[in-house]
Amino acid sequence: MSGKFFAVFLVAAAVLLGGCAPLVFTAGAGAGYVATQEKPRNKVEAFFDDLGRSIKQTTRKLTGEEPAKRQRQGKTGGGLTLKIHKSALTPTKVNKGEQVQLVLQYSVAGAAKQGVKVREKSSLLRNGKELTVLKDESNERENGTWENTLTFAVPESAEPGKYTVILRVSAQGQTRNAQRSFTVR
């Protein structure tokens, strides 16, 4: 195979692969090779890569519809009531590689029979700046109490210090927030 034909073949293969692997050319008679990157390029990328792989979450319904008396106490006019009952983060002091668990319990009352679209969002902050979104999902929720559990491993590349997680639940223009912190040793 001639050097020019081989070079054209490699370029065409790179286009067909659609960026699946970077194409690197070396000097000399059309010789080349495909190189893949197995390790993240820097510490910041390693942090997000490790964190993203470790996130696990579940949501479950704890109770059915709120009793009528409690619904009436919420809001006059019988509209939607969204309330955070509990938020917790354990442990509050962790080493790199250890698991952090977040629990958010909230209730929905006054929603239509088919439910209401509820958005759950959890963001990780350091020094008041958002590092990443751990969870951002919207789902139909019926009236009742819901519990979301989210776990993640503290990346080996995490800097020691204080981190904060903002837990947010919102529906029909209402937003409720909770904030929990942990320290990486």
Image (spheres, rainbow, N blue to C red):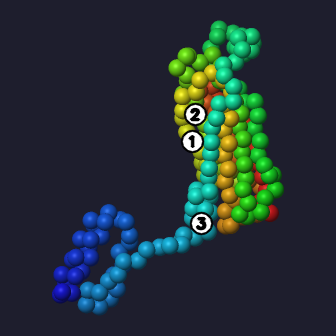
The reply to whether residue 27 is in sight is yes
Q: Are marks 3 and 2 in contact (CB under 8 Å)?
A: no
Residue 136 disc label: 1
SS at mark 3 in the image: helix
Q: Are marks 1 and 2 in contact (CB under 8 Å)?
A: yes
SS at mark 2 in the image: strand
Residue at point 58% right, 70% down?
Answer: 42
SS at mark 1 in the image: strand
**Position of 21 compared to 47: left or right?**
left
Which quadrant: the N terminus? bottom left
- Which amino acid type is shown beneath numbered disc 3? Ala
- In the picture as drawn, the residue positioned furthest to the top comes out as 77
Query: Label 3: how many residues lie within 10 Å, few (<14), some (14-19) or many (20+)?
Result: some
Q: Which residue is mark 3?
A: 46
**Alpha carbons under labels 1 and 3: distance apart:** 21 Å
- Residue 31 position within the rendered picture, expressed as x and y whole percent measured from the top left: 29, 87
Residue 101 disc label: none
Residue 119 disc label: 2
Mark earlier in primary sequence (3, 2): 3
- Which amino acid type is shown beneath numbered disc 2? Arg
Mark earlier in primary sequence (1, 2): 2
- Which amino acid type is shown beneath numbered disc 1? Asp
**Alpha carbons under labels 3 and 2: distance apart:** 28 Å
**Alpha carbons under labels 1 and 2: distance apart:** 7 Å
Residue at point 54% right, 35% down?
Answer: 138
